[in-house]
Image (cartoon, rainbow, N blue to C red):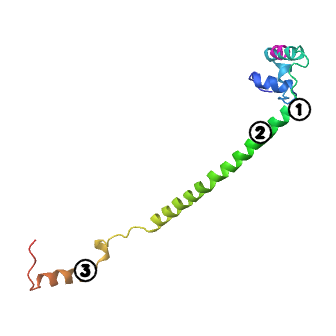
Amino acid sequence: MSDRHWTDEEMLLRLFDVGPQDGHLESCPVCARRWETVHAKYQSRPEGLYEVPEEQLRAQRLAIRERIGHRKRKSRLIFVPTLAASLIILAFVVVIFRQAPRELPGPEDFSQDLVLEEIFSTALSTEPEGII
């Protein structure tokens, strides 16, 4: 049982024996009164007023099935390009992040001998420096 009152849709569904069967009508006087009103109006309807020829119902069912079939095919057509685009983007992201940037060697990566050798070779060089 729920604490909320039944909606009009739930009342109509119950009228055709497909609505909720949670015992709410027995425990809620407000919904019970509404149900009695809806049920009384339904019972007092004129007979034959709402009869629809079988051919019309058959045509409606066929039209609904056809629309549902087209909707499924259309959704498949949208799904394939979306999936392909997603895979391309995913591959691009993987390639970008796999190529980690190479860091330049820091001062701790050089030995003192190499640094001193570079300094002395520059200082003892007889070639003139270029003018910038």
Which of discs 2 and 1 lies nearer the camera? The answer is 1
Res. 27 visible in picture = yes
What amino acid is found at the position of numbered circle 2 in the picture?
Ile
Whichever of callouts 3 and 1 sits on the residue coming sooner in the sequence is: 1
- Characterize the magenta stretch by its predominant secondary structure: helix
Q: Which type of secondary structure does the marked residue at label 1 adopt?
A: helix
Whichever of callouts 3 and 2 sits on the residue coming sooner in the sequence is: 2
Give left or right: position of 125 versus 102.
left
What amino acid is found at the position of numbered circle 3 in the picture?
Gln
Q: CA distance from mark 3 to mark 1?
A: 98 Å
Quarter assignment of residue 16: top right
Q: Is residue 34 inside the magenta stretch? A: yes
In the picture of the structure, the residue carrying the numbered disc 2 is: 64
Which of discs 3 and 1 lies nearer the camera? The answer is 1
Vertically, is 37 above or below 15?
above
Q: Nearer the viewer, residue 57 or 91?
A: 57
